[in-house]
Image: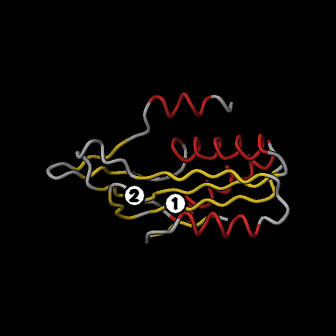
């Protein structure tokens, strides 16, 4: 399941609900990403997307994860709009029979979201606003899966 949200979400409640709906999965892996304040230089992050296009591209990544690992279920929640520093921006949950598949798929999907997902990101500070691209490290992390 993919949810692009303009409002905040409770990561703990979403993980609990995902765990319940994942039936007899032996492993649940999750990752919660928060907007970094960059030592006080960033007040918020603004994310823009074309929801239908963005959701389609994320679904393709989920399909690729399902092709690589035996997954029972996947949940991706990603915020769009303006998100304050410290607030959750992304939640990825994966369920499988075994932990290695759950961990690897969760990592794979986060690397995809950081580098390939169709979002435009702007960091906003007290006196600055600049569009940002993925870091070189993000691309190196993503290259592990090719």
Count of numbered circles in the view? 2
As measured in the structure, the alpha-carbon distance from the residue carrying label 1 to the one carrying label 2 is 10 Å
Which mark is on residue 78?
1
| Residue 99 placement (x, y as % from top left) | 77, 44
Residue 145 vs residue 36: left or right? right
Residue 56 vs residue 99: left or right? left
Residue 24 vs residue 103: left or right? right
* Label 1–label 2 contact, CB within 8 A: yes
Is 123 rendered above or below residue 13? above
Local secondary structure at mark 2: strand
Local secondary structure at mark 1: strand
Which mark is on residue 47?
2
| Residue 91 placement (x, y as % from top left) | 56, 57
Q: Quadrant of the C terminus?
A: top right
| Residue 26 placement (x, y as % from top left) | 82, 53
User: Which residue is found at the position 74% from the left and 69% from the top?
Assistant: 20
Give 123 or 104, whichever is nearer the viewer: 104
Of callouts 1 and 2, which one flags the residue occurring earlier in the amino acid sequence?
2
Q: Residues within 10 Å of mark 2 (few under 14, many from 20)?
A: many
User: Which residue is found at the position 63% from the left and 42% from the top?
Assistant: 107
Q: Please identify the quarter of the rendering in which residue 43 is found.
A: bottom left
User: Which residue is found at the position 58% from the left and 50% from the top?
Assistant: 31
Foreground mark, 1 or 2, reads: 1
């Amino acid at each position: 399941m993919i949810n692009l949200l303009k409002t905040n979400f409770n990561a703990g409640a979403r993980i609990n609900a995902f765990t319940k709906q994942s039936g007899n999965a032996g492993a649940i892996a999750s990752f919660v990403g928060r907007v970094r304040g960059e030592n006080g230089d960033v007040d918020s992050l603004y994310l823009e997307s074309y929801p239908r296009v963005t959701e389609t591209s994320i679904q393709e990544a989920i399909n690729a994860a399902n092709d690589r690992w035996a997954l029972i279920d996947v949940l991706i929640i990603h915020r769009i709009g303006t998100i304050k520093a410290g607030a959750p921006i992304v939640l990825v949950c994966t369920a499988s029979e075994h932990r290695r598949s759950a961990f690897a798929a969760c990592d794979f999907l986060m690397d995809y979201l950081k580098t390939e997902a169709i979002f435009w990101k702007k960091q906003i500070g007290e006196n600055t606003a600049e569009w940002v691209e993925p870091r070189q490290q993000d691309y190196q992390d993503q290259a592990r899966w090719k």
